[in-house]
Image (cartoon, helix red, strand yellow):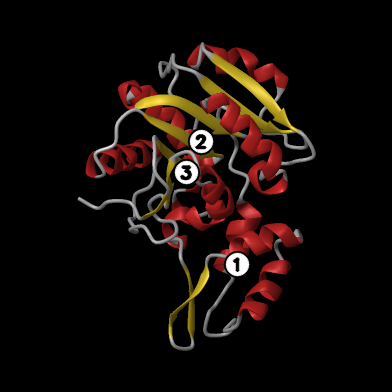
Amino acid sequence: MDVLHSQILGEGKPLLVLHGYFGMSDNWKTLGNQFSEDFQVHLIDQRNHGRSFHTASFNYDLLAEDIYNYIEFHQLDEVYLIGHSMGGKTAMLFASKYPELVAKLIIVDISPKAYDPHHNAILAGLNSIDFTQQNTRGKVDKQLSEYIPEFGVRQFLLKNVYWKEKGVLDFRFNLQSLTENNPEVGKALPANATFSKPTLFLRGEKSGYIIPEEQMIINNHFPDHKVVTIKNAGHWLHAENPKDFYKEVCEFLK
């Protein structure tokens, strides 16, 4: 059995953190260190991301199963679970399948509904990289900029570029699998999936991922929930306003 790679920080009740699409555990290092003052924080790389294993197959059932195996392996009990974007979808499905393993759930800027595939420019940019030609980070960035004008998004993606061996760059994520399985990422939570324990939805004020009209659908799946808006932040609210994000999470987990 393959077990997901993670960074474990601090002592106390386990707090598991799941990154979004094209992300990795490192994206959460600063907040992870803060949370580790009160919790045992598990910053997890989901399959096909970061330092975790690569597979051709990729969908939320598998991602939820990976979390189950991770919890078994580390002998954890009644965890707190945070998931951002794709990680939020994994967290929702996991909590609905294994409610006995989750004490409280925090979903960051994603709702249970289906989202149309909208990472086409990113995928096109990533697939245009030829590491024999783009053999420095600067050259990779320049190539990506033809597809992805947003500097912040490129910086986020460039965190995945590493030296596979001397003089050879590569991506940490499994680009082929993520490209082939891109339609899976936007899939809705199954209609009958529910989780009745306390759930916090955090949305970015400038993000369009959770809108007021979705209150009903969230309620159907998560009857004991609240939605809190993080000011001056978009989809990456934990990076854009970490202070308010940290405060809201800590208040909810008290």
At 72% from the left edge and 47% from the top edge, which residue is drawn? 240
Question: According to the image, label 3 marks what residue?
Answer: 18
Residue 170 lies, in percent from the top left, at: 48, 74
The relative height of residue 247 versus residue 118 in the rendered view (above or below) is above
Sequence-first tag of 2 and 1? 2
> In 3D space, how far apart are the residues under numbered discs 3 and 2 (Cα atoms)?
7 Å
Q: Position of residue 149 (x, y in %)?
A: 76, 61
Q: Amino acid at mark 3?
A: Leu
Q: Foreground residue, 230 or 89? A: 230
Please report the residue visible at 48 percent of the width from the left and 88 percent of the height from the top: 167
10 Å crowding of disc 1: few (<14), some (14-19), many (20+): some
The answer to whether residue 21 of the structure is visible from this angle is: no
| Helix, strand or loop for disc 1 | helix
Say whether marks 3 and 2 touch (CB < 8 Å). yes
Task: Give the CA separation, mark 2 to mark 1.
Answer: 22 Å
Horizontal relation, residue 228 to residue 32: left or right = right
Disc 1 or disc 3, which is closer to the eye?
A: 3
Q: CA distance from mark 1 to mark 3?
A: 19 Å
Corner quadrant of residue 76: top left
